[in-house]
Amino acid sequence: MLDLSQYNCLGEALRAALDRWDDQVCLIEADRERENVRLTYRQFKQAARPVINTLQGAGFQSGSRAAILMTNQSKWLISAYAILFSGGVLVPLDYKLSPAEQLALLAHAKAQVLVVEYHLWRAIIQSPEFGSLVARTVLVTEAPASADLAGATRWEECRDSREPRFIARKRNDPAAIVYSSGTMGRPKGCVLTHENYLEQCIALTSLYPFWPGVRYLSILPTNHAIDFMVGFVGPFVCGATVVHLRTLRPEYIRDALARYKITYLTVVPAILKALEQNLRKRFADLPPSRLRVLNGLIGLNRALTRGRPRVRISRTLLKQVHAAFGGQLRALFVGGAFTEPSTLQFFYDLGIPVANAYGCTEAGTAITVNDLKPFRADTVGKPLPGAEIKILDAGQDGVGEVAVRSKTVMSEYLDDPELTAETIVDGWLRTGDLGRIDKAGHLQLFGRVKNMIVTEEGKNVYPEEIEAAFEGLPVKEACVFAANYVWHERKMTGEQLVLVIHPEQGGRISEEVVAQISSRNRPLLNYKRVGGYLIWEQDFPRTASLKIKRMELAAQIREKLGRERVVPL
Amino acid sequence: MTTLDQTTEEILELAAAHFRVPRAELNPGDDFFTKLGINSLQALDLLTRLEQHFQIELPDYELQGVSDFRTLAERIQSRL
């Protein structure tokens, strides 16, 4: 098992790895068929020096916060290392958010440094909220020579390559602030400590080890806690190679798997489904005789791998299928949203084990993962080493809210002691997800108790965040719910947001109001749109400070109205 | 030189054919996620088809914050 006990912080563990693995390749950045960057650990260390010196020269010090706003690429990891080496706190931001949302999170995190790709920076400086930028130092990557950077510094012009000063942190110091949501409402900045990351790294690599020669294809955004761990920290401390691909198109993912002989890959269910559809189509196009042979081999592989994966046998039996994946793939990880068991089974039967996992940013990424001993398509696996799970308020069928206790659980939500106290109770993190632990110790998920939806691309959407879009409607009051939060349905797919309207008078709203709702709904990002509205004719229950008592309102609605009363938009 | 209107028209025709939607049902201001009933991966697939059609390279980030045909046409037009 990986021993990280001698390290107190991520910067220290990564610094030691760069020295230890020296001439091994640590990072490859590809864009379609082109290879942009290939760095050894030694070269990575040299590439980081000018960035470190620029940060420290700008007054960056122990505990300073620096945000990264980039797609997956080599400069993301180099910048992250520079921040951690300088004793900083990393604030990875979602590049898919709007500039206004990104600026709001930068302000919430009080980030004094921003490292950002040019196309994202261009959108920020053009946004009306640009004046609210709090970061004093901005490093912009890949800007065209003639671009106006609005006072920012070019990342590529950081040139001071002297040996920089390392700044150590303690295990319980914050390493990163990762936003799990809260872009328009109440920001949820998960404060993850160095200990959280070091412990998560030990736990994950104990099940799925990295070593020099392993190649991890990083396509989930590195701003997500999971890719930061398995697409950076884990491979680096073990001397493995991270491959970045600057496009998410399935055809290039397939190409990269083969070209770089990838060992591990993490995907969201939507990408796994696209890979499955492509393979099924290719199988369907085979001549009938070859298809019969293939189906026979798949059946044989299924029988031989019932108890555990047997990679060599599978690669021999289904040589061509494996060759299309590069021939070295040991496992695919999937998480972030619900995956159809049939999809998981499809890949497993081909000898490509898919480890279905479950986690959340608050728990420092993964909580459970399938250990493939044996493969189970119907669960999200067993708790990681060092993690305990229990089911709160379980019904007769054993289903209740999943709670987790582990050294990987965040210390708090940034600047929100109230929400922290609601979420971490007596040392147990309440996940808000509904689950049951079966006799084999596997966790099965059934839906959610919290007011939230998850898209098939793994996006968490909190209804409260959507409400701002409907402020000022000519109605008495309005709020947004996840439909499953109001009408408890044990399902993991087809989740929907519902706008609850309390009209000014009478039980109806005019066509004009409906048109207003539609026109406010339309510009929202597709996964943030409400699917319908519901008329509710009573006052919303509220606290003394006039906040909506959401749980109470949801219960009142559930009692009086059925889901069929939602009017689709 | 192709005009923005021509580019928009070509995008609408291509999207209609690719996702099997009657051309007459698509308008420049439409949200293509809703109108075509597609997710972000399928939108990237559309981007690949547009690259082939216009013979240009469109990085994934050109879809960033874009959900209507007209804005997509503007992004493509600037690269023609």
Image (cartoon, rainbow, N blue to C red):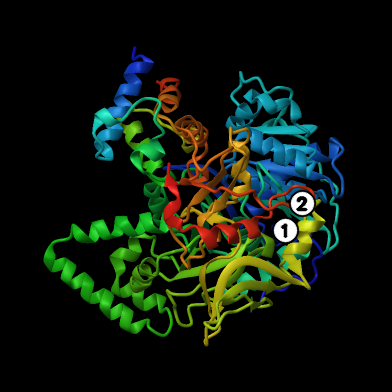
Looking at the rendered image, the quarter that the N terminus of chain A falls into is bottom right
x, y (%) of residue A399? 55, 77
x, y (%) of residue B19? 28, 40
Q: Is residue A62 above or below residue B55?
A: below
Q: Residues within 10 Å of mark 2 (few under 14, many from 20)?
A: many
Q: Nearer the viewer, residue A479 or A16?
A: A479
What is the three-letter code of the residue carrying label 1? Leu
Q: Residue furthest top?
A: B1
Callouts 1 and 2 on one subunit: yes
The residue lying at 42 percent from left, 78 percent from top is A309
Left or right relative to A435: residue A180: right
Look at the numbered disc 1 and give the secondary structure of its residue.
helix
Task: Identify the residue position indicated by label 2 in the image.
Answer: A84
- What distance separates the C-alpha of mark 1 from that of mark 2? 9 Å
Q: Across the whole image, how many numbered discs are drawn on residues?
A: 2
Residue A410 seen: no
Looking at the rendered image, the quarter that the C terminus of chain A falls into is top left
What chain letter is assigned to the residue under label 1?
A
Q: Earlier in the sequence, mark 1 or mark 2?
A: 1
Left or right relative to A390: residue B77: left
Where residue A14 is drawn, which disc sits there? 1
What is the three-letter code of the residue carrying label 2? Leu
Left or right relative to A475: residue A318: left
Q: Nearer the viewer, residue A511 or A63?
A: A511
Q: Nearer the viewer, residue A288 or A473?
A: A473
Say if mark 1 contacts mark 2, CB within 8 Å: yes
Look at the numbered disc 2 and give the secondary structure of its residue.
helix
Q: Nearer the viewer, residue A322 or A518?
A: A518
x, y (%) of residue A544? 79, 51
x, y (%) of residue A146? 61, 18
